[in-house]
Structure formats: C-alpha cells, structure tokens
Image (cartoon, helix red, strand yellow):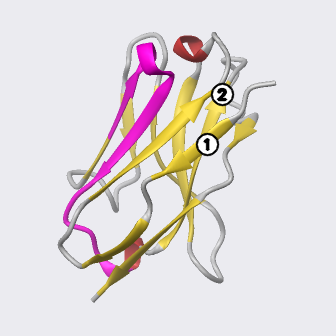
Amino acid sequence: QVQLVESGGGLVQAGGSLRLSCVASGRAFSRYTMGWFRQAPGKEREFVARITWSTLTKYYTDSVSGRFTISRDNAKNTAYLQMNSLKAEDTAVYYCAADTSGGGAWRIWGQGTQVTVSS
C-alpha cells in the first residue's frame, strides 16, 4: 500500500514562502500523477495543483497560478509545492494525493500539513 507523508508546513508572514514536500513509499511513484489540495476551516477541500507522471504537465487553480509551483523528483519519490507570495487566504491544511491508476481518481492521500499565513 502506497503511503504519502507531507512536511514543510508552518507559520509564515504574508508575502513569505514555504516549500511543502510529499514523500511516497513504494517503487511506482514515477508513474503516479501527483496533486496538492487544501482545506481551510469551514470550507471544502479544493484542488491546488497537479503534475502528471508522463509529460510532467502542470495544472494550477487560478488563485495560486503564478505564485505556486508544483514539481517532482522521481529519484527521491517526492513531490513538492513551492509557495511564494503567500496570502492570508492561503491558510489551510495542505494534502498531497496520488492518482495511482491513471484514471483521474485520487486514491491515496497524505495526512496533511498545516500552513498558516499571518497578515
């Protein structure tokens, strides 16, 4: 069973930066599309970004486009989310997820890491 472990969250001032990491167990990481999601208090979980396994194509939700960058290092079984120019509205628990079947379903989720941006 694949497991995902996020790290890198914390408290940062508005305008600052954080880099989240998501380490996956197992040997098939390079064949998973990886995604980042977030859930703010009182809100539903929302998509943030994803990176495909085959073409490394990246997609972002509009609110983070130009500020966040998703990447992956298959040799390290790790996906990253570089977050710059953080805003108070970016405060949320951030989750990484893996599409292990290639069918567009996020089957595996990490436990989440808290990001708090103070204004």
Q: Is residue 84 left or right of residue 92?
A: left
Residue 42 location, quadrant: bottom right
* Residue at the spot of label 1: 5
- Amino acid type at mark 1: Val
For the point 73% across and 36% down, which residue is it? 108
Which residue corresponds to the image point at 63% horizontal and 32% vertical from the top-left? 98
Task: Say if the magenta span includes residue 40.
Answer: no
- Image coordinates of residue 82 in percent, x first then y, are 30, 48
| Quarter in which the N terminus is drawn | top right
> Which type of secondary structure does the marked residue at label 1 adopt?
strand
Q: Earlier in the sequence, mark 2 or mark 1?
A: 1
The answer to whether residue 85 is magenta is: yes
Q: Which residues are magenta?
A: 70-88
Residue named by callout 2: 99
Residue type marked 2: Asp
Left or right, 35 with reference to 107: left
In the depicted structure, whether residue 27 falls above or below residue 116: above
**Label 2 crowding class (10 Å Cα cut-off): few <14, some 14-19, many 20+?**
many
Alpha carbons under labels 2 and 1: distance apart: 15 Å
Q: Position of residue 53 (x, y in %)?
A: 49, 16
Identify the residue at image location x=39%, y=12%.
55
